[in-house]
Image: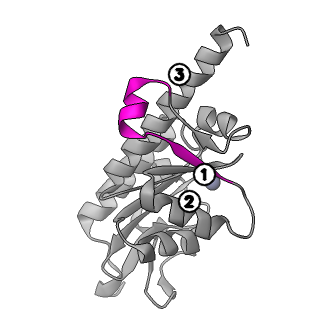
Amino acid sequence: MPAAMSIPPAILRDMQEVGRDLYRLALVTSHGGNLSVRDGSAMWITGTGTMLGRLQERHIARVHANGSHDGPPPSSDTFLHTTIYALGGAAAVVHAHPRHAIALSFDTGCFVPGDLEGQLHLKQVPVVEAGERQVEQIAHALQSSLVVLLRGHGAYARGQSLWEALHWITALEESAHIEVIRRSMTPR
Ligand SMILES: [Zn+2]
């Protein structure tokens, strides 16, 4: 393997540990979700269909600024990750399928957490409709929000590290779970 292709050990370790946490917390299925880390004008991103709970170096692609890549075929969300980094401000992106948050995404254009932790950290979470403009809309929404929902599909979070992006995904799912419990208890 050429030296240019070797993933820095610290980035590999973060991707493995955050991927494992996402799977063990049931925030992705065995083969769902994706992760990336910006590396200058390039990025490291999980390959399409890889198991986030069992990531190895061979599952991670390096995508260059010109769009070419080394390693496995990169995630089908690669263009979205590229667009988020191009707009600036993010060093890592996590995509997961937090189930309570997805359930709430069907009937709202913006999820506003009712719990104090969610209000403090997330304030409000925009919901983007799936369609031709979803990449542009998600990337732009992540300029002002830490995490965004794609209706009926999942969440995208950005951070200065994968750990920060994981924090926003888990915070979103905690707030959404509380909201679902609250609705089930409250006569409407
Ligand atoms: Zn997905």
Q: Is residue 139 left or right of residue 36?
A: right
- Would residue 35 be visible to someone looking at this image? no
Tell me residue 23's x, y (percent). 50, 41
Tell me residue 150's x, y (percent). 64, 52
Q: Of tags 2 and 3, which is closer to the observer? A: 3
- Residue 32 is marked as 1
Q: Quadrant of residue 100?
A: top right
- Please determine whether, in this image, residue 17 is positioned above or below residue 66: above
Q: Name the amino acid type tagged 1.
A: Gly
Q: Is residue 183 left or right of residue 89?
A: right
**For marks 2 and 1 on the same chain, the one whose residue lies earlier in the sequence:** 1
Q: Is mark 1 within 8 Å of ligand 1?
A: yes
Queried whether the magenta region covers residue 117, the answer comes back as yes
- Residue 178 is marked as 3
Q: Of tags 3 and 1, which is closer to the observer? A: 3
Q: Crowding at label 2, few (<14), some or many (≥20) Cα neighbours within 10 Å?
A: many
Q: Crowding at label 3, few (<14), some or many (≥20) Cα neighbours within 10 Å?
A: some
Secondary structure type for disc 2: loop
Secondary structure type for disc 1: loop
- Residue 128 is marked as none
Foreground pick, 146 / 38: 146
Q: Name the amino acid type tagged 2.
A: Thr
Q: Residue furthest bottom?
A: 66
Q: Please report the bounds of the magenta region as a residue range.
A: 114-128
Label 2, on which residue? 50
